[in-house]
Image (spheres, rainbow, N blue to C red):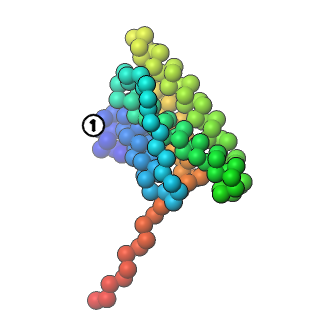
Amino acid sequence: MKMLEKYLGPAIAAIAMLVFFASMYSSGCGYKSVKASAPGQATAANSFEDYSYKTLLDAQAGLNATRNEIQAGTLPQSLVPIFDRAVVVYNECIALEKSYDKVLRSGGDPATVQQELASNLGSLVGLIAQIRPPKTPAPAPATKQ
């Protein structure tokens, strides 16, 4: 993480790590991978906005799938409080993304909003990982010497 921060700055490094963990979640979980499409996506103002937008698209698809699976009974009801918190954080991220875009495009300094958005995205990815933990590979078989 420190190396990423050195080259990209702390906010972009945090988003890069979030995207990494989100991609691990979406491709390595034990459930069907769900990937949101982005029809009619507005042009992102910078790479941070692009990464956060794509992370939110993936989170939305994952939350929709989770809601459907909880309702269908394929996921336990014990996950409902975590799911509910993830939805609240997701909605906060959407509001922060809009605020970030507005401040950035008006020529203001979005640093405070960017830090809050990066923090909330980290929380969101963490909550989703609690609902759908990444699949870990089986340990390699022991070799005989």
Residue 141 placed where, x, y %? Answer: 38, 80
**Residue sitting nearer the eye, 81 or 71:** 71
Residue in the image at 42% along x and 48% along y: 23
> In screen coordinates, is 143 left or right of 98?
left
- Quick check: can you spot residue 102? yes
Residue 82 placed where, x, y %? Answer: 65, 47
**Disc 1: which residue:** 7
Q: Is residue 106 above or below residue 11?
A: above
Give the residue type that dot 1 points to. Answer: Tyr
> In screen coordinates, is 78 left or right of 47?
right
Local SS, label 1: helix
> In screen coordinates, is 94 left or right of 84?
left
Residue 31 placed where, x, y %? Answer: 53, 56
Residue in the image at 44% along x and 29% along y: 39
Q: Is residue 18 above or below residue 49?
A: below
Residue 15 placed where, x, y %? Answer: 41, 37
Q: Quadrant of residue 44?
A: top left
As drawn, the residue found furthest toward the right would be 77
Residue in the image at 30% along x and 44% along y: 3
